[in-house]
Every structure is written in structure tokens, then in C-alpha cells.
Amino acid sequence: MAQLNKCVLAYSGGLDTSIIVPWLKENYGCEVVCVCADLGQSEELDGLEAKALASGASKLYIEDLRGEFLSDYVFPTMAAGAIYERHYLLGTSFARPLIAKRIVEIAALEGADAVAHGCTGKGNDQVRFELTFMALNPKLRIIAPWREWHIRSREDALQYATEHNIPVKQSRRSIYSRDRNIWHISHEGGILEDPWQEPEEEMFVLTVAPEKAPDKPAYVEIDFRQGVPVRLNGESKGPVELLKALNKLGGEHGVGRVDIVENRLVGIKSRGVYETPGGTILYAAHQGLESLTLDGETLHYKDVVAQRYAEMVYNGRWFTPLRESLDAFVRVTQERVTGRVRCKLYKGSCKVVGRQSPYSLYREDFATFGADEVYRQSDAEGFINLYGLPIKVRAMLDAMGPLAADNQPVTDIVRD
């Protein structure tokens, strides 16, 4: 393998990334700098630096990216209304471009000529990392050990760690593959590989079972300013504080569980179970406010954009001209998405039960079924006649058959 000077590795401190450090040094003869991104995964970061250094790394950066994650990635995606394949709120998808972006920045600071990640060759994350590397610094060499080395199992990895004196904490390993950040937690593997099997209750981390949630509903009010949540129950909160509070409240009421079979970019289907309590509440509230403040044409076209936006985020195409252009459209739609929404949480459900905005397009005097002086119901007749004219003409043609230029029936051309 071609020798390198320095490589920056996306590092979690788990078994895989721990053995990648000596593997890179052994096979590429390079210095290894590790980067751990704190996205609110609630994993212990204390002692991580000593572990990275003991594995052979020269340095470890621990980066708190939670605020940037929510403000620059999560909230814009929510404002777009992007949901992948009807249910997935993209919790892992938009985390990877941010991590990869910070790795590229640190590679520049360190004068590194390569970057590496621990993603397998069977998933979506390898694409998300590498497209970001390509977009932000195409000169960097990209190394994906799982596509190169002989290691094929956890047992292989443990043996490699032992042979290279790498400190690996022996702990009971979950049967599930999980990814967690402040927005969500995902579960894959184990019994979930059989799409007929119902998830076991002990698998869930952030939410209680809906049937065990409180018998009394909870109400929560969220204020938005230009599409961004800024207050919770009348109290101003920053993005991290606000989402943590919503996660706790939503989790207590069993809100945000999703069980889907999704289409991976790499061509296979996978079954995943996601918990996104606070995010589910925010999506519902945001959509409720948009129903009040966006005109019909814009709202309907925005639904078209939302699907394309979701596909781009899921497929790792965050740093692309099209995503940036779609963001520009979304930002304009959010200029008047300001107001307050009240949601009712009850045994796994989140329903919008109130909404108000100084930019509301809803007019009670127009919409009322009672007597009013602003809407003449007789006007509807002319509108319907014009609106339905193309339908009427086609129906007349079907009844009479094809017509010649003189409007006489024509049958010989049709027969020929």
C-alpha cells in the first residue's frame, strides 16, 4: 500500500475504530489523528483520549457539534419537511456529513493527506462520509479498512486487538446494531432481521411502551420563528436544551417509535426501528404551523421538494448544488412560518390541537359555515362551470365520438 504521511480517522472508541488505528500505521506507515464527534450520543467520553493514544494515535480531538448539528442540519431538513420513505426522520443520515466535514477541517489543520472511517462496505454511511470528503477536499486519500482488511467478524477484531496490545473493554455486546445522537436512536440486527418479528420491548431506549404511558395526556406549546423552534411552553431555549426537553417529554408518552423496511442506497432492503420522540413532536408542530401560514400552491409544491430533499440527505448528497438550491427555496417558504403550536401527547400519539400565527392565512369570517358577508355562495356556480369545462368537453366527445372539421362524426379514419 502507498505510504502516507498522516491520516485523520473518524473515531468512536469502539472495537472497530480502536483496531483501525494500529492497522493504518501498520499498513500505510502513517501517523493517525483521531476525531470523535459529540452529537449527543450519551456515550462516556471520559478516558477516550487515553484509549486513543494507547491504540497508537498521536492525538484525539473531541468535538462538541450538537448545536451545529441541530441548527445547520436537523432544523433545515425539518423545515423542508423531508421524511425518507414516509416514516424515517433521517437521524443518522444528516449526522454523517457534519462529522465528515469536521474531519476534513481537522485534516487541513493537521496537514494530513488522508482520511479514514470505520463504515462497512454494506451500508449507507460509507457513501455519506466519502461523498462529503470528495465535495470538501477531493485531494484527500480516502481509506475504508472494512473494504480492504482480512477482518470479517468481531472475533477476528478481538484477536487483532490482542495481538497488537490494544486495550478493548470487554462488555456484553447488544444483539442490536445501534446509532444514537441527540435527534434519535436506531436499532438494526438481531431478531429485527426477520421482518415478521415484533421488536422486543427491552430493546427500546428513549421511549416507554405506549400502553404503559400515562393515562393522562400532556400538552406542549412550541413557538417557531421563521420555521425554527425557539420557545418551549413560553420559555426561550437554545436548540440543544429544547430538543433534550422534548425528547424527555415525548419519551415518557411513548411518542416517536417507527418500525420500517427501507431501501438502502447500496441496493438492499433493511429493517430498522427508530426512536425519535422530540423530533416527531417538532415535525408535527412545524407542519401544523405551515398549514396556517403557507398558501396552497406553495404548500403542495413544497411536498414535492420534501421527497427529493429526503432522498438527497439519505443518499449522502448534502454538499451538492441541488441541496443548496432546495435550501434556498425552503428558506423563502419559512419567512412567515412564525407562531405557536399546541400539541397533545397521549400513549404514543402526537396531535396538533392548536395553532396561531400573526401571518395566518386562515380567516374565520371566510371559512365559517354560518352567515357571512364576504363570500357570495352564488359566485361558486360560474367558477365550477369554468373549472369543469375541460372535463365537460371530453365527456361530450366521448358521447358523440370523433368529429371532423365540420363537427360531423368521423368513423372511417378511426376504423382505418
Image (spheres, rainbow, N blue to C red):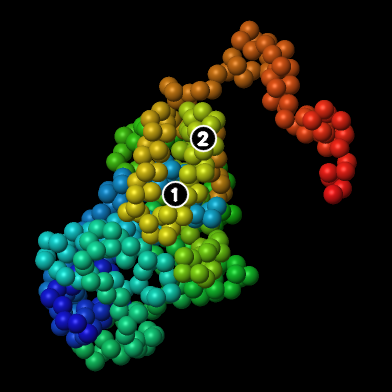
Amino acid type at circle 2 is Leu
Marking on residue 309: 1
| 358 relative position to 164: left or right | right
Q: Is residue 88 left or right of residue 326?
A: right
Tell me the amino acid under the disc marked 1.
Tyr
Q: Going by the image, does 267 lie left or right of 13? A: right
Residue drawn at x 21%, y 89% is 164
Q: Is residue 392 above or below residue 122?
A: above
Crowding at dot 1, Cα within 10 Å, few <14 / some 14-19 / many 20+, comes out as many
Q: Nearer the viewer, residue 150 or 11?
A: 150
Within the image, what quadrant is residue 169 found in?
bottom left
Give SS at disc 1. helix
Q: Position of residue 3 (x, y in %)?
A: 16, 81
Relative vertical location of residue 62 with respect to residue 405 in this rendering, above or below: below
Residue 131 visible, this orientation: yes
For label 2, the SS is: helix
Mark 2, residue position: 299
Residue at 15%, 78% (x, y): give it.
4
Mark yes or no: residue 218 visible.
no
Name the image quarter holding the N terminus.
bottom left
Crowding near pointer 2: few (<14 within 10 Å), some, many (20+)?
some
Question: Could you tell me which residue is drawn at 20 percent across and 71 percent down?
Answer: 114
Image coords of residue 390 (percent x, y): 72, 30
